[in-house]
Amino acid sequence: MAAKRGTTVYLYELAWILPSFAIPVGMLVALVVTAFGAGVHLPGLERRIDPTKVAETAPFDKPGLVEIAPGQYEVRMTAQIWSFAPNEIRVPAGSTVHFWATSKDVVHGLLIPKANVNVMLLPGQVAHAEAHFDTPGEYLIICHEYCGIAHHTMAGKLIVEARR
Amino acid sequence: MTRSEDRLTAAFVAVALVALFGGVLTGFFQALEHAGMDVYPSTPLVKSYYHSLTLHGVLNVLVWTTFFICGFVPFMTTRALGRPLALPGVAWLTFWVMLGGFVLAAIPLLGNAATVMFTFYPPLKAHWAFYVGLTLVVVGTWLVTWNLALTWRAWRREHAGERTPLAAFMGLVTFAMWTIASLGIAAEMLVMLIPWSLGLIGGTDPLLARVLFWFTGHPIVYFWLLPAYMSWYTLAPRQAGGKLFSDPLARTSFILFLVLSTPLGFHHQYTDPGIHVGWKLVHAFLTFAVFFPSLLTFFNVVASLESGARARGGKGWIAWFAKLPWGDPSLAAQVLAMLLFTFGGIGGLINASYNLNLVVHNTAWIVGHLHLTVGTAVTLTFMGICYWLVPYLAGKALWSRRLAQAQVWIWFVGMIIFSNTLHRLGLLGMPRRTMIGAAAYVQPEWKALLPLVGVGASLLFLSSLAFFLNLVLTLVVSRAPAPAPAVPAFTEALSGADHAPAILDRWRPWIALAFVLIAIAYGPTLVRLALTTPFNTPGLRVW
């Protein structure tokens, strides 16, 4: 009797273990396909910067927007308590924007909702993110990491202008 | 067990409950702020939203959990082994070290000199006492590990060849896993933050600090969860009138947590620069691997509850659920905690999903997730445990069973409203850890949802007041009944420990495997950072 009961339990266990294994594996496959097939990239290993000399280090000595190729823009951005520089960016619809950013003081974040731009800005690290903007309109740029008493005032705008 | 050991558990649980009270009070203030009522000008001690938020995080996720666990897990382990702790003097010393650490950290914390959140990312620079205090709390947890290990060894000498009783096995796995995992935060504190806050070294490095923090910061959630699982596996089935479905499957799941909990912390740092994306992907894989023991737990615990409900006349595929003994607030709390944890687990998979994380990282979604996991799966379970543990320790009947029944449902409903709203706000791009009521960029679609944050949190606050009121009145008003309140008996298993492979009862191979996986997942990045980090970021106090 005991052996029989043990066998039944064993079958139930197996009936659960196999799908429990298959579900995460299936999800991983979906993840890898979207990561490499759809080209949604994460910030990665770029380079270090001396966090006390950001204002003297290229390209962050001249924060701003640069057109590097037709439809391709580069934003060189610094984050500091409690602002972004530049804090307003205008690009035409259909542009790809490469963000190169770092922090001059504490940890900040760069979040552009609806554009999948989400990257931490750490003192000492150059961060990179890129996004493609097709839909005209105003996008928020928000610091999404606590950076001191006025953290909630730290924000900017990215304006995508319709092409004429 | 000796009265001294019960007093020790009572001491840990008392500190935990005091911390929880501070945590829920400040949490309530924050939700009111989000709903448009800024109460901080009228709170004398709490200086700002961010001061409140730091208190809320540290008191709830660091102090309430750790102190409760250090009281509860040794209590369960010694009962399961049927012998007292090997070193009772050290056990009390542990309590005083941890309490001393907590008080030391609490002084700058209350004084607004450590408003750095519970993640204390440098170069935000807190008072040194904050770092030293928290380190002493961690050192205390190591003393618990040592004591439990010696207790188990003494048991083993008298019970050669026997299987370690399940609850004791789970207690040991919990503390072994935690001790390995806590090496990251220990290194961050001892090598970086403490000498820096004392002025012995000039600079720090935000990236290395975050890597070391999240080395511990993810597995710490298993340190909170595994004691809740211990209750779900070894007490709840019996409280439900049933038996544990499978003891070997439970052991397998815990061994997998021991091995897999730590080498996956980069999934908190997907959006960090300075870490190679390949290693981030490896950590994503390992995070999905740890989903496997979670699914095993889900199945085993639900099947066990089902055996109880069927024994009570439950029928059908789903309908049996209604036949659980819902009148027992201790069990009701735990079953409701499990229900919400299902959604916490699914949300966790989304967070762990590499590029999908870009949509939710550091948004209000994460806050919603955290409140389903540590805020409900863990906290509501611990509340359910308190409903038998506090009466047992006090030797008095629970003041009101009905109030307790109402309390757990109010928490459940309040948390559904609160956490669902935060998840949605996160998807709409609302950042976490932000004084939203004062932000200039609040969107109309956020505004429409924010009052619900206040509604949910008000229910949660009401529920926690009912919880504390019940415990306080148990202590001061209730009478000692006959028979005295008892500890729930350990569950029997349908498939018992003797069906489990013997290798599950060995420690060295699994701990060695855990270290091998950590070396693979973290080794190259840690070595690179150790060799190249310049430690040249100055500290700042910006609050």
Image (tube, coloured by chain):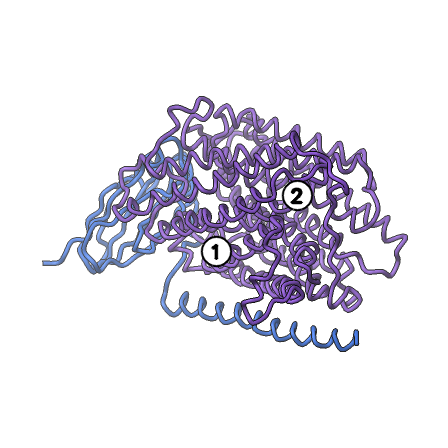
Chain colours: A blue, B purple
Which residue type does callout 2 highlight?
A: Ile
* Residue B518 percent location from the top left of the image: 62, 55
* Residue B216 percent location from the top left of the image: 59, 46
Q: Residue furthest left?
A: A164
Front position in the image: B494 or B508: B494
Name the residue tied to disc 1. B276
| Secondary structure category for the residue under label 2 | helix
Quadrant containing the N terminus of chain A is: bottom right
- Please tell me if label 2 and label 1 are on a single chain: yes
Relative vertical location of residue B506 with respect to residue B433 in this rendering, above or below? below
Q: Residue furthest top?
A: B44
Name the residue tied to disc 2. B69
Relative vertical location of residue B44 with respect to residue B92 in this rendering, above or below? above
Image check: A41 left or right of B62?
left
Chain at numbered mark 1? B
| C-alpha gap between disc 2 and disc 1 | 36 Å
**Image disc number at residue B185:** none
Is residue B152 visible to the viewer in this orientation of the structure? yes
Which residue type does callout 1 highlight?
A: His
Q: Residue at x 42, y 70 (%)?
A: A33
Q: Quadrant of residue A136?
A: bottom left
Front position in the image: B77 or A87: B77
* Number of marks present in the image shown: 2
* Residue B274 percent location from the top left of the image: 46, 49
Quadrant containing the C terminus of chain A is: bottom left
| Secondary structure category for the residue under label 1 | loop
Front position in the image: B321 or B416: B321
